[in-house]
Image (cartoon, grey):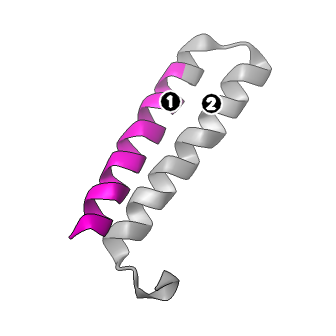
Amino acid sequence: MAGAGNGNERTWRVLAGIGGVGVGIGLIAGVPVLSLLGALCVFAGLIGLMATRRR
C-alpha cells in the first residue's frame, strides 16, 4: 500500500523530512534554535502522518 497514499500524506512526509534535515544541520552547525525548530517540524509531520494513515 505504499503507492496508495494521497497528496496529504506526501505533504506530511515532506514536512517530517525537512524537519529532519533541519535537526541535522542544526546539530552539525551548533545552532540549537535550528535544531529545536526542526524537531518541532518532525513531530508535527509524524503526528500528521499518523492521523492521515489512521483514516
User: Which residue is depicted at the point 43% across and 69% down?
Assistant: 10
User: Which residue is depicted at the point 41% across and 87% down?
Assistant: 4
Mark 2, residue position: 23
Q: What amino acid type should be assigned to the residue bearing mark 2? A: Val
- Outermost residue to the left: 55
Q: Looking at this view, is 53 or 11 the one in front?
A: 53
Give the image location of residue 24, x and y in percent.
Answer: 70, 32
Q: Looking at this view, is 21 or 52 the one in front?
A: 52
Mark 1, residue position: 39
The numbered dot on residue 25 is: none
User: Which residue is depicted at the point 39% across and 80% down?
Assistant: 5
Q: Is residue 23 left or right of residue 14?
A: right
Q: Is residue 50 left or right of residue 35?
A: left
Element at badge 1?
helix
Element at badge 2?
helix
Q: What amino acid type should be assigned to the residue bearing mark 1? A: Ala
For the residues bearing labels 1 and 2, Cβ distance under 8 angstroms: yes
- In three-dimensional space, the C-alpha distance between marks 1 and 2, rounded to whole angstroms, equals 6 Å
Q: Is residue 33 above or below residue 21?
A: above
Q: Does the magenta run of residues contain 54?
A: yes
User: Which residue is depicted at the point 67% across and 23% down?
Assistant: 26
Mark 2 is surrounded, within 10 Å at the Cα level, by few (under 14), some (14 to 19) or many (20 or more) other residues, namely many
Mark 1 is surrounded, within 10 Å at the Cα level, by few (under 14), some (14 to 19) or many (20 or more) other residues, namely many
Q: Is residue 44 above or below residue 10?
A: above
Segment tinted magenta in the rendering: 36-55
- Outermost residue to the right: 28
Q: Quadrant of residue 27?
A: top right
Give the image location of residue 54, x and y in percent.
Answer: 26, 65
Q: Is residue 9 above or below residue 36?
A: below
Please state, as top left, top right, bottom left or bottom right, where the C terminus lies in the image: bottom left
Give the image location of residue 34, x and y in percent.
Answer: 57, 22
Q: Is residue 49 above or below residue 35?
A: below
